[in-house]
């Protein structure tokens, strides 16, 4: 074992997990053209954006004012950065960095070069690094901040550890950052929220802990946010800002609190929302049904109470709905079961007592479903009568997070003990 930067790097077999990546590389040589094509499109997009907003110091630079050897300067910086990084990679069983020698960094395995998107005097610069599934062990040095023209950094399924260097803030063109399935630690890396061009963020399957910055919930740049399977804690802010995210995955963390009504501000873009096992509680807001673009909604394995909002019947694009392993009660609305694109509906392990209309025979619609362990009369594999009677119904009211339980006709907060 090697110890560095307060983390152990055991030479063990890598964790093989499924990852959703915008680019998946399994063979470096075979897939170089697609990555170069992607880099070209990203750099073209960045070029247009930077020219419009004048954010880049290079924007509008006249060629006569640029250094004569601007390309050489960039490539020398990249050489320094990559050599510094190679020195703190302590295990490379697949020899991915074995050819990281000499000044021609564009020939390094996993390193991709392209012209600068907004400075014609720089004809080649390091624009992408992809070391996915490399089983590399080490950490990320501060010198990575020298790679200021990176558009993609893909490091998933390695054994990198430690904290992220603050110098990543220099990567003003970074569009995709995938650090998933590593061993990074420390608080949520706020540096990633300072990256002005970042659209794809994947931090899943690491060991980040502590609160999530509120800015993550109010970010109008990120299109995809994956922070699941860490040790993060947070209360989802009661007032969410506008967001451009189409995919949000917060599953398997230690969040708390309710899903606020301001989730409706995600309506124009959000297509996938996964909050599995995130310690979410209280009632589901009616506004959840305003997310008209949703295709996947999974809020299973939480502590959600009250009825299923009928407003979910307005989610015409919904394909997968998982409400399982909560404390939902009341009826399963027919409008949800009749959604035109619904393919999978799970509401098992709740306290639901009635299936309206077609909900009682979803097989007839070709919908895969799971209704086990509820309180549905005449259905198999349900809870016992004693269990169903012990769970008190919960009424949900606008503006009230936790709902109110009914005990012998008396309404009390669902988080309060029942009246004696």
Image: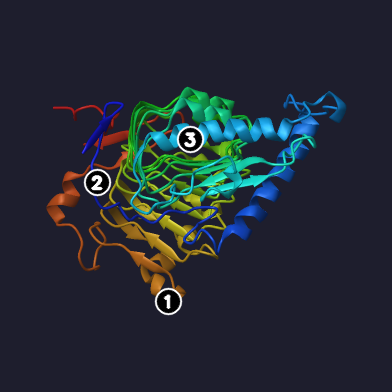
Instruction: Name which quarter of the figure residue 385 lies in.
Output: bottom left
Residue matched to label 2 = 11
The one nearer the camera, 101 or 289, is: 101
The one nearer the camera, 339 or 410, is: 339
Q: Alpha-carbon distance for marks 2 and 3?
A: 22 Å
Residue drawn where x is 53% and y is 65% of the image: 341
Disc 1, SS: helix
Q: Between disc 3 and disc 1, whose residue precedes? A: 3
User: How crowded is the residue under tag 2: few (<14 C-alpha within 10 Å), some, or many (20+)?
Assistant: some
User: How crowded is the residue under tag 3: few (<14 C-alpha within 10 Å), some, or many (20+)?
Assistant: some
- Which numbered tag is attached to residue 83? 3
Residue drawn where x is 30% and y is 62% of the image: 371
- Which numbered tag is attached to residue 364? 1
**Quadrant where the C terminus is found in the figure:** top left
Cβ–Cβ under 8 Å for marks 1 and 2: no
Disc 2, SS: loop
* Mark in the foreground, 2 or 3: 3
* Mark in the foreground, 1 or 2: 2
Q: Alpha-carbon distance for marks 3 and 1?
A: 62 Å
Q: Is residue 240 something one can see in this rendering? A: no
Going by the image, does 78 lie left or right of 284?
Answer: right
Q: Alpha-carbon distance for marks 1 and 2?
A: 52 Å
Cβ–Cβ under 8 Å for marks 3 and 1: no
Residue sticking out furthest to the bottom: 364
């Amino acid at each position: 074992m090697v110890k560095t930067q307060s983390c152990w790097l055991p030479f063990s077999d890598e964790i093989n997990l499924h990852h959703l990546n915008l680019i998946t590389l399994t063979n470096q040589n075979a897939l170089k053209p697609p990555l170069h094509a992607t880099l070209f499109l990203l750099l073209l997009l960045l070029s247009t954006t930077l020219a419009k907003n004048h954010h880049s110091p290079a924007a509008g630079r006249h060629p006569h004012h640029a250094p004569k050897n601007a390309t050489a300067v960039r490539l020398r910086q990249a050489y320094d950065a990559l050599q510094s990084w190679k020195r703190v990679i302590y295990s490379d069983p697949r020899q991915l960095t074995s050819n990281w020698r000499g000044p021609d960094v564009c020939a390094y395995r996993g390193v991709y070069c392209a012209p600068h998107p907004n400075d014609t005097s720089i004809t080649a610069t390091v624009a992408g690094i992809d070391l996915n599934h490399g089983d590399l062990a080490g950490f990320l040095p501060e010198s990575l901040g020298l790679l200021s023209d990176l558009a993609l950094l893909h490091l998933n399924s390695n054994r990198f550890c430690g904290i992220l260097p603050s110098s990543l803030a220099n990567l003003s063109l970074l569009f995709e950052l995938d650090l998933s399935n590593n061993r990074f630690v420390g608080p949520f890396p706020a540096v990633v929220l300072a990256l002005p061009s970042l659209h794809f963020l994947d931090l899943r399957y690491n060991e980040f802990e502590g609160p999530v910055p509120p800015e993550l919930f109010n970010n109008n740049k990120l299109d995809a946010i994956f922070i699941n399977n860490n040790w993060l804690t947070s209360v989802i802010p009661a007032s969410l800002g506008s967001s451009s995210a189409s995919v949000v995955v917060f599953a398997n963390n230690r969040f708390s609190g309710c899903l606020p009504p301001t989730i409706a501000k995600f309506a124009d873009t959000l297509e996938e929302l996964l909050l599995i096992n995130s310690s979410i509680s209280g009632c589901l807001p009616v506004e959840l049904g305003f997310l008209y673009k949703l295709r996947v909604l999974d809020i299973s394995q939480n502590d959600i109470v009250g009825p299923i909002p009928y407003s979910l019947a307005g989610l015409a694009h919904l394909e997968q709905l998982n409400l399982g392993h909560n404390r939902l009660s009341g009826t399963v609305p027919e409008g949800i079961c009749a959604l035109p694109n619904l393919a999978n509906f799970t509401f098992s392990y709740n306290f639901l007592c009635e299936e309206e209309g077609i909900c009682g025979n979803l097989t007839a619609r070709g919908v895969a479903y799971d209704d086990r362990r509820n309180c549905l009369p005449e259905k198999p594999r349900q809870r016992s009568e004693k269990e169903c009677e012990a769970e008190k119904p919960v009424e949900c009211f606008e503006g009230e997070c936790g709902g109110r339980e009914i005990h012998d006709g008396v309404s009390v907060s669902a988080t309060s003990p029942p009246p004696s």
